[in-house]
Amino acid sequence: MTSRKLPALLAAAGLCLSGTAHANELVVGWAETNDTLNPVTTGKRNVGPILSNIFDTLVWISPDFEVEPLLAESWTVSDDGLTYVFKLREDVTFHDGTPFNAAAVVSNVEYITGENTQSKISLGLLGPCAHAEATGEYEVTFTCDEIYAPLLAQMGEPYLGMQSPAAIEEYGAELGQHPVGTGPFKFVSWTPSQSIVLEKNPDYNWMAASLGHDGPAAIDKITFQIVPNPQSRVQQFQSGQSQVMQQTPGLYWKTLTASGKYTELPVEISGLGIFAPINASLFPTDDILVRKAIMYAVDQKALIQLAEAGVYPPSYTPLSVGMLGHDEDAEGKYPYDPEKAKSLLTEAGWEFDGTTWTKDGKTLSVKITAISGKAHYMAQAQAIQGFLSEIGFDAQFEALNAPAWLDLNIDGGSTLTPSQYIGVDPDALHFWFLPDQYFNWSHWTNDELTDLIYQGRSELDHGKRAAIYQKIQDILLDNAVILPIRQNLDLTLADKSVTGITWSGGGFQYFGAASIAE
């Protein structure tokens, strides 16, 4: 692309053309639009990193899932596992000057649990521990209806970021346009589909100890420039219009990292990775042998090469690498074996004429779907379509807009679809495999699995919990209701002048400890 065409391309993408950022001001090329900047009502993973720079949580989760003090200086858990007492910092104020104390935490919990709030993620993170009481000016006690082992780690997710009680009361339904936290950066402006601007909080002095940074952020201003088009985002970054770029497309990642000009930050997003639930309620995948045939028919490494230039590590288990309970031994359950897939179909009563599989007058037809606005999902779905077509499936692919895609998968009209789910605790599996859950798109569960999931969330011993989740993964793989695809990474690049970018556990980029060399 010539330099003459570049300004027009950037202008079309809604980018600022006033030149590169001033010293101590950071521009980040951001891949997705935002629904809201309210931690409680957002439903988007990619809003999380922006929130983590505006809002602090009671605890900080390091990239390796260590729980550290943040707004809470310390905490104790009762012997019965039902009561958590947090001692809070006494030197914190919200960006609007409102004091942070136990009453503020209680106000946040009451807002999260309010009937009119319509929490998307936050309420689920609290689980059965959604009652908070101020037991001192700087002491708050959470009471659980049952033991809930994931609570401490999930307290560190940005969707439980503390908001100013004054802002909650003042802005009401418009709170998402006026975010007020205690974090290292304060909200300045949000131009929908174009940019979000933050500025340094000059009073900040309580960063997590592991980040090794005292006092306010070194960066004065951050502009998240929203550029959904991957090529435009790359061109913006290469031209110096941004110093950081997230969600670098795989093909460009290989080229740009090979140049040696940039800092590579493959941000690990924990949870279930990128995967496809397989619908066990829809013909023909209501037959376990057909589902297992699909598992053997897909070559994850080749899929990633075809769809995303091979830059991501493959995944073979329901929980991503590094998660509590991730089971390396389960990775070999379904090696790529198309002949094995064909033998399973024959065992299931399907007959192959060299072109098509049929049984009782029906064709072996499956429907693979993807969100039309997500290029990587569409590429993954089409690669899966190719693998299944190779062994004789009538594999149909359909790209749908997000609302239609959601409705179809909820209603059970899709055979399989690439997706992702983020979590800092293996209990994230319950959203996909407990009865009546919104994301139970495999439309399958059983009593043993349900019992194990509840055991896992109520077991406080890490070793015992890990063993439980290994059993859970075995059950899911043995029943072939989830097709793991790849590890979930946000391939972030930064100019070498930018240092100190890190992320919290779960994969939420954090700029509080970052700096820009002059």
Image (tube, rainbow, N blue to C red):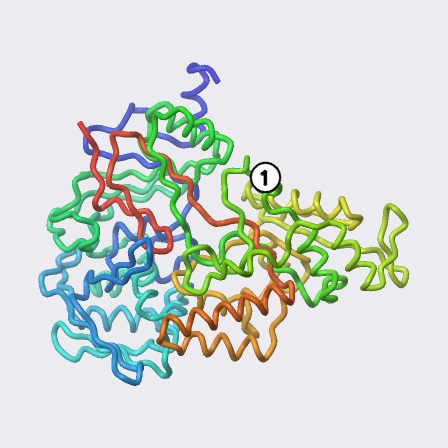
User: Above or below — where is 102 with respect to 22?
Assistant: below
Q: Is residue 213 above or below residue 208?
A: above
Q: Quadrant of the C terminus?
A: top left
Q: Looking at the picture, does residue 26 appear above or below residue 89?
A: above
State whether residue 25 is above or below residue 181. above
> Does the rendering let one see residue 29?
no
Q: Secondary structure at mark 1?
A: helix
Give the tally of numbered discs. Answer: 1
Q: Residue at x 31, y 82 (%)?
A: 82
Binning the other alpha carbons within 10 Å of mark 1 as few (below 14), some (14 to 19) or many (20 upward) gives many
Name the one closer to the observer, 412 or 163.
412
* Camera sees residue 119: yes
From the top left corner, tell me how far across and down residue 153 is, in percent. Answer: 32, 65
Residue at x 24% of width, y 36% of height: 499
Q: Residue at x 9, y 61 (%)?
A: 91
| Kind of residue at disc 1 | Ala
The residue singled out by tag 1 in the image is 307
Is 411 left, or right, of 342 in this rendering?
left
Q: Nearer the viewer, residue 301 or 177?
A: 301
Quarter of the view holding residue 149? bottom left
Q: Nearer the viewer, residue 357 or 111?
A: 357
| Residue 511 spot, x, y in % from top left | 26, 44
Q: Position of residue 138 (x, y in %)?
A: 13, 72
Q: Which of 324/49 is in front?
A: 324
Give x and y (percent) for residue 67.
27, 63
Left or right: residue 345 compared with residue 311: right
